[in-house]
Amino acid sequence: MDQRVFDSSMFLCLLVLITCNNVVLVPQAEARAFFVFGDSLVDNGNNNYLLTTARADAYPYGIDYPTHRATGRFSNGLNIPDIISWVPNHVAVLINSFSEQIGSEPTLPYLNPALDGERLLVGANFASAGIGILNDTGIQFINIIRISRQLQYFEQYQQRVSALIGVEQAQRLVNQALVLITLGGNDFVNNYFLVPFSARSRQFALPDYVVYLISEYRKILVDPIVHHFRQGIL
């Protein structure tokens, strides 16, 4: 698999730890919408609809997926959002029946034309492989959906859902949703280490770069759009 668009295992481990720590805090509820933002760890096909070199729509991607075909996931099979949605019942017991708390089918990529009508109520996946916390991360992939654009798409999503079920119900759906955000690996892999003498590696020593990334990530998390999700973010 192409390491240029994969994120570091460090951030994957961090995500898993955060997920496990938050599972027990999610109350029992009916089916909840699920919104996914981020990079190749969670992209389930948005990049298929873009003119970009960050793609996972050909063999051997997907060889262990139920259809045995590439889907746009940067994985041989399922990815993180799939596992959260499809985790088997015997595993769910170990994490407080997490899958039952979501209670919904996996989300479709936001750019997928099939995401329409009542399927919008399940949620949406806005992630795009190659992006990072920083806007200059992933420029080598030409056309990707940066996090600011993903949040703009989410605003568009809210308008579509409001037209479908009304503003009040749409707001309730968003307020009760589960949200997965994963960012940061590409800022290290593709914007610091991979490119020899990269601009960021010349600008920052590694410890200072980490501090800078954290400060920029905070700006994303305090964005008014993200604020809607405060109780449901993983």
Image (tube, grey):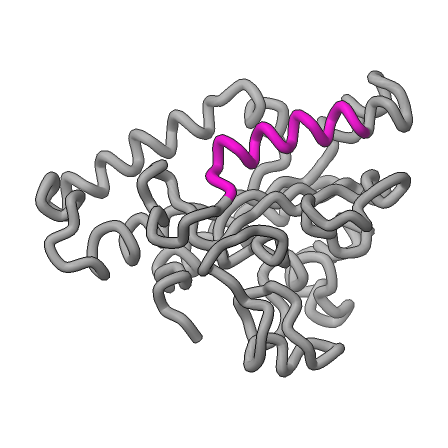
Please state the horizontal and vertical placement of residue 33, each as a whole percent of the image: 76, 41
Please state the horizontal and vertical placement of residue 91, each as a whole percent of the image: 69, 69
The residue that appears at 72% across and 57% down in the rendered structure is 85
* Magenta part of the chain: 145-160
The residue that appears at 80% across and 55% down in the rendered structure is 105
Is residue 141 within the magenta segment?
A: no
Left/right of residue 150 with respect to residue 139 in the rendered view: right
The residue at the far front in this view is: 51
* Vertical arrangement, residue 198 with respect to residue 156, above or below: below
Residue placed most toward the observer, 98 or 70: 70
* Vertical arrangement, residue 189 with respect to residue 176, above or below: below
Chief secondary structure of the magenta span? helix
Res 34 → quadrant? top right
Residue 193 visible here: yes
Res 48 → quadrant? bottom right
The residue that appears at 61% across and 63% down in the rendered structure is 72
Please state the horizontal and vertical placement of residue 224, each as a whole percent of the image: 54, 18
Left/right of residue 206 with respect to residue 53 in the rendered view: left
Q: Quadrant of the C terminus?
A: top right
Please state the horizontal and vertical placement of residue 66, each as a whole percent of the image: 74, 77
Left/right of residue 56 with respect to residue 215 in the rendered view: right
Is residue 148 within the magenta segment?
A: yes
Left/right of residue 234 with respect to residue 89 in the rendered view: left
The residue that appears at 44% across and 75% down in the rendered structure is 1
Res 177 → quadrant? top right
Residue 28 visible here: no
* Vertical arrangement, residue 210 with respect to residue 88, above or below: above
* Vertical arrangement, residue 82 with respect to residue 23, above or below: below
